[in-house]
Image: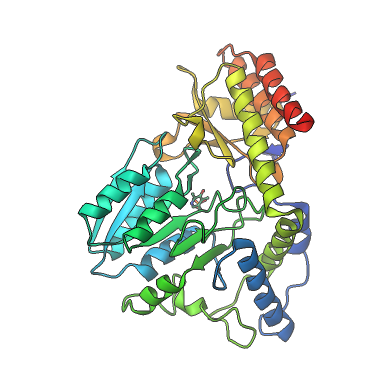
Amino acid sequence: MRYSETKPPVFTLTAGPVDAYPEVLRALGTTVLYDYDPAFQAFFEDLTLKAQEALGCDLPPLILQGEPVLALEGAAASLIAKDDVVLNLASGVYGKGFGYWAARYAKKVEEIEVPYDTAIDPEQVRDFLKSHPEVKIVCVCNHDTPSGTLNDIDAIGAVVADAGALLIVDAVSSWGGMPTSPSSSQAGIYVTGPNKCLGCPPALSLVAVSEAAWAKIEANPDAPFASMLSFTDWKSAWKKTEPFPFTPSVAELNGLSAALDRYLDEGPEQVWARHALTARICREGIKGMGVELWPASEDIASPTATAVKMPTGIDAGNVLREARARYGVSMSAGRAETLGKLIRIGHMGPTAQPGYALLAVAAMGGALNALGAEVDVAAGLAAAHATWDAEIDA
Ligand SMILES: *Cc1c(COP(=O)(O)O)cnc(C)c1O
């Protein structure tokens, strides 16, 4: 028996969007209130304050009406003025991509780019900023998802703060799945979204903006307003007494509320531990069957997605198709520069569960063998299982 490509997979173990938590799915099906009903306005204020608690930011965050690409583009448009010099840090496809947005608004974009299986060295950023005091804004991606690699945004944030510049962070696929926050990274703008580790469908952005970044946005004559990209439009909309710039996505906000409740009830530290353990079991399983991880060092492997290097002569697309057809397991391809070179197993939200790591190892190993790669699936599963048991018995 093979699984049909025209029917949904049995297991979605992708690197985002991920399947939603059952609580979120139920909330998406609840009453759609009129946005100016006082009950909805009070709900939106409470929701924003709940998001602030979860993010641990100083000011109420923005909840924008589009998946996080909206907030990333909006960050570039709102913060960067025509006479700004920006330093973009690129260790992967998303980091690189942010530089193209920055270039639309900045006078000049400088860039530090490193191979996409490595991470940015904060000391290199320090040296660069010393020799380029004109840089006002630095941009970095925390977890560059198409590579499954992490940048140390707290260390980079400290360097950027020392230089008196503002940091824009893309934490879309890390926040909510590992210890990272707007305050620990000293971010001016910290962008994340509910569609990765919070286990919501793709639809909204969460954005923490610091006092200093608001001051810069408000002084930027080119910052958009009356626009989908505008941060300014939404600054006060969280208060139940203030109007919305346009209609919020009521159903998606109901889903976000359920996801934040779930996150805060389970406890962020427990949630992060669950992501970290799932990723560790997965990595041990992959290595145990004799297959290599994509990140050059395991220190920079993300706890929210495991990127697996394809053995020589094996086509990643065929492995994905085979895993889905044989086992009903859907995983993610690479993107742009990493497309065809790796496969990504997501550990985000509902799929950050140890059992899914075993399933992913079995599905990937079986697919590789079906394509003639000759990997030792049993050894991989034994290593994964031993890692899980060691944690249980610790
Ligand atoms: C998912 C993700 C985004 C959102 O972008 P899409 O390409 O639309 O999914 C942004 N940044 C990172 C690092 C992501 O993982």
In this image, 79 relative to 282: left or right?
Answer: left
* Colour convention of the picture: rainbow
Q: Quadrant of residue 339?
A: top left
Residue 214 appears left or right of 104: right
Residue 4 appears in the rendering = no
From the image, which quarter does the C terminus lie in? top right
* Rendering coords of residue 265 (x, y %): 76, 58
Q: Position of residue 259 (x, y in %)?
A: 70, 59
Residue pictured at 63% horizontal, 39% vertical: 276
Position of residue 52 relative to residue 123, above or below, is: below
* Residue drawn where x is 60% and y is 56% of the image: 202
Residue 211 vs 91, above or below: the answer is below
Q: Is residue 348 above or below residue 295?
A: below
Please report the residue visible at 61 percent of the width from the left and 54 percent of the height from the top. 195
Q: Quadrant of the N terminus?
A: top right
Residue 164 at x, y = what percent?
Answer: 33, 64
Asked where in the image residue 291 lies, by quadrant, the reply is top right
In percent of width and height, residue 340 lies at: 45, 30
Foreground residue, 143 or 325? 143
Name the foreground residue: 271 vs 104: 271
Point 47% across, 58% down: residue: 69
Marker count (numbered): 0
